[in-house]
Image (tube, rainbow, N blue to C red):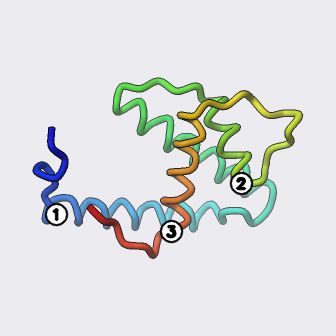
Amino acid sequence: MDLAAAWQDEIIQPLLRSARLKQGILLGKTGLVRGEADSQAALDLLLQNIITSSAIEGEQLNAASVRSSLAKRLGLLDVAQAYPTSKRSEGLAEMMLDAVGNLDVPFTA
């Protein structure tokens, strides 16, 4: 399917705005990186979001690998405790943290 032909801005934009608002509320509630307990809670929420979204798409991920990728990027991972990661888990972690870290940047097609 040609993504450019399928993109309908009038349908997608309200959904994206709603998702970004809910994402911001969720992150606000977690107090992202305000302490160890809050950081772990934020890590768990981000992990759950990635795992659930991928499951909706029919993709099963190695949760430990994704968690390790997220923790490493958030500075929460002791190298000795690191679980082996994959390019896929690293990419998903990067994408998620980019999305939550750039809430003020508009989406582009």
Residue 29 vs 6, above or below: the answer is: below
* Amino acid at pointer 1: Asp
Q: Secondary structure at mark 2?
A: helix
- Please identify the residue farthest to the right as the structure is shown: 80
Q: Residue at x 52, y 51 (%)?
A: 96
Residue 52 percent location from the top left of the image: 45, 36
Dot 1 corresponds to which residue?
Answer: 9
Which of marks 1 and 2 precedes in the sequence? 1
Residue 90 vs 102, above or below: the answer is: above
Which of marks 1 and 3 precedes in the sequence? 1
Report the quarter where the C terminus lies.
Answer: bottom left
Q: Secondary structure at mark 1?
A: helix
Badge 1 crowding class, 10 Å Cα cut-off, few under 14, some 14 to 19, many 20 or more, is few
**19 relative position to 25: left or right:** left
Residue 27 vs 43, above or below: the answer is: below
Q: Secondary structure at mark 3?
A: loop
Between residues 54 and 89, which one lies in front from this camera angle?
89
Dot 2 corresponds to which residue?
Answer: 74
Q: Residue at x 62, y 60 (%)?
A: 30
Residue 31 percent location from the top left of the image: 66, 65
Q: Residue at x 54, y 42 (%)?
A: 91
Q: Are marks 2 and 1 in contact (CB under 8 Å)?
A: no
Q: CA distance from mark 2 to mark 3?
A: 15 Å
Tell me where residue 74 sits by quadrant.
bottom right
**8 relative position to 22: left or right:** left
Badge 2 crowding class, 10 Å Cα cut-off, few under 14, some 14 to 19, many 20 or more, is some
Dot 3 corresponds to which residue?
Answer: 102
* Amino acid at pointer 2: Leu
Q: CA distance from mark 2 to mark 1?
A: 33 Å
Tell me where residue 86 sits by quadrant.
top right
Q: CA distance from mark 3 to mark 1?
A: 20 Å
